[in-house]
Image (tube, rainbow, N blue to C red):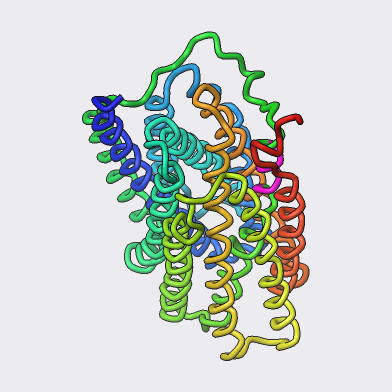
Amino acid sequence: MTAQRPEGLSAYVAVTAAYWAFMLSDGALRMLVLLHFHTLGFSPVQLAYLFLLYELAGIVTNLSAGWIAARFGLTRTLYAGLGLQVLALLALARLDPSWALWSSVAYVMAVQGASGVAKDLAKMSSKSAVKLLAPTGEGGLFRWVAVLTGSKNAVKGAGFLLGAALLGLWGFTASVLGMALILGAILSGVALFMPGGLPGGKKGTKFSEVFSKDANVNWLSFARVFLFGARDVWFVVGIPIYFYAVLSDGSEAGNRAAFFTIGTFMAVWTILYGAVQAYAPKLLRAGTRPEGELVQAARGWVGALIALPALLAALVAMAGEPQLWLTVTLIAGLLVFGAVFAVNSSLHSYLILAFTSGERVTMDVGFYYMANAAGRLLGTLLSGLSYQLGGLPACLGTAAVLLALSWLGAGRLTSPAEAQPA
């Protein structure tokens, strides 16, 4: 076992580097698409449509990717995710501005769907690798999960800023072509130099084995749906469009300034969110606490999150129209939301690996991230609808309701000792 550790560590580093490259492009692409099509006159609901297939694809992909990885190996699913993202970027560059509105919507939805498949292939491969490569004892699994997840979100946050900057400086088509070229080069490098340490596939694995019989896995997945729905209901459409309305006067210079400001906020929020995720094991003293206490912590932290969006929704509704104090309060409140949300997310990412076994890791992680994608799909759809119907207060109020449902799911989790019959 000792002789295999350096090889396993090298594989972990290679997987993490590939995942970073992917998430940088994923964050940049989301910001490019959102801001570019908003300037073309797309409504909040139409903007939400652009990402629906992306999230729907994630549900199907995560459900099947765990089985595919169990059958064909983790490196193949990782390479497939990176390669498909390159193809999606190239396809998006072929969008013709002269196309009719709904033709453009349908085309971008399809390409975003392919990108969603790519993202979840890469994510499932990377997160499953941690279970197989991480050292055991003294919170080692939680630390490695937190480092991968936290750094991923920090990189994705940098991608938001990168996407906004590229749109303002180079335009849409040149930006996506440049990202495709760079990501393709990274894929080639990773494929050439990937060390050993990850398992190959196991023939005979049945697709029906994807569905877990473990109540903890199922309840954690339930809680995950509504946790991420509560974030995306304001994050995907509501806050970017609200800030655009506050910051831009409609001129080209005003648009450019708004792009940079919105991109900066989204980047800072996501980077700080990732930093808190990486710090979560120390914050929660994971190395010295039994798993049962961490299960209880998952219930408490989501309960603490519910009041934040409810309070912000009330403040926006009472203010009536954008004001400086309101914008400052929103930024501060959403940063606090991000910190508490990060602890919740980090706990979930640890618990799914703690609840599963090495034999089932790709399938349980795939099922769990299917729930994650379902939450993003729910949040994306509700983000456009709630903003269209009731503006930002409706987005934030809906987030509070979704968090309450997540709390109910987390409340059904049990520690291994509680789960054993007397």
Image position of 135 with respect to 267: above or below: above
Nearer-the-camera pick, 8 or 71:
8
Nearer-the-camera pick, 174 or 349:
349
Is residue 249 in the magenta section? no
In the image, taking residue 342 as reference, residue 179 lies left or right, namely: left
The part of the chain drawn in magenta is 218-224
Residue at 47%, 13% in the rendered image: 202
Image position of 49 with respect to 126: above or below: below
**Residue 141 visible in image:** yes
Nearer-the-camera pick, 172 or 339:
339
Residue at 59%, 66% in the rendered image: 41
Where residue 79 appears, as percent x and y from the top left, is 37, 30
Where residue 217 appears, as percent x and y from the top left, is 65, 36
Q: Quadrant of residue 414?
A: top right
Quadrant containing the N terminus in the rendered view:
top left
Q: Quadrant of residue 62?
A: top right
Quadrant containing the C terminus in the rendered view:
top right
Where residue 218 appears, as percent x and y from the top left, is 69, 36
Q: Quadrant of residue 22?
A: top left
Q: Main secondary structure of the magenta part?
A: helix
**Residue at far top of view:** 204
Residue at 36%, 25% in the rendered image: 198
In the image, taking residue 203 as reference, residue 214 lies left or right, namely: right
**Residue at far front of view:** 422
Residue at 55%, 24% in the rendered image: 360
